Image (cartoon, rainbow, N blue to C red):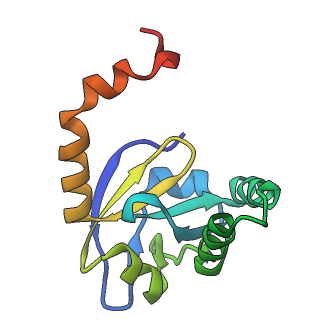
Amino acid sequence: MFMGDYRHSLDAKNRLIIPARFRQDLGETFVVTKGLDGCLTLHTEAQWAERVAQLEKLPATRSDVRKYVRLTLARAQECTFDSQGRIQLPALLVKDAGIQRRCAVIGAADHVEIWAEEKWDAYEKDAGEDFESIAESLPEMGR
């Protein structure tokens, strides 16, 4: 399980350090792609295969499905770590996420998300204000 919030900077070559805790669970090769809410997502190879299988089950006759599948897969790229635990993010994905330099690398249970730090801070502040009401609306949480 991926969890935690780590802050790192993107270097001039779009390389980003991924926390050691995440590197082990991601494996040697993994996939980075455009995520929801303005972030990038990292998926293990097994998770990615499962996600693609889910995408293939969606009705291709719907234009919104075609758009989502195309953008998700067109932006996807296999990644590996360099000797310093960094990945090189594609320039297009960096632009999509609005990353200038500072990043928040967060664990999101079954995947890792990379956010422009200021976007993550704003998202976290906004969502944090509604935390209790969101929890109450999730009957599956049961507490």
Query: Is 73 displayed left or right of 143 in the figure?
Result: right
Left or right of residue 23: residue 128: left
Viewer-nearest residue: 29 or 100: 100
Q: Quadrant of the C terminus?
A: top left
Q: Residue at x 31, y 78 (%)?
A: 10
Residue beneath the point at 59% across and 51% down: 25
Rendered view: 66 above or below 43: below
Residue positioned 39% across, 59% down in the render: 37
Where residue 69 appears, x then y in whole percent? 67, 69
Q: Position of residue 124 (x, y in %)?
A: 24, 47
- Where's the N terminus, which quadrant? top right
Q: In the rendering, at what x and y percent does residue 93 appear?
A: 46, 79
Q: Tell me which residue sits at (67%, 64%) in the image.
A: 65
Looking at the image, is 110 positioned above or below residue 48? above
Image-quadrant location for residue 61: bottom right
Task: State which quadrant residue 130 falls in.
Answer: top left
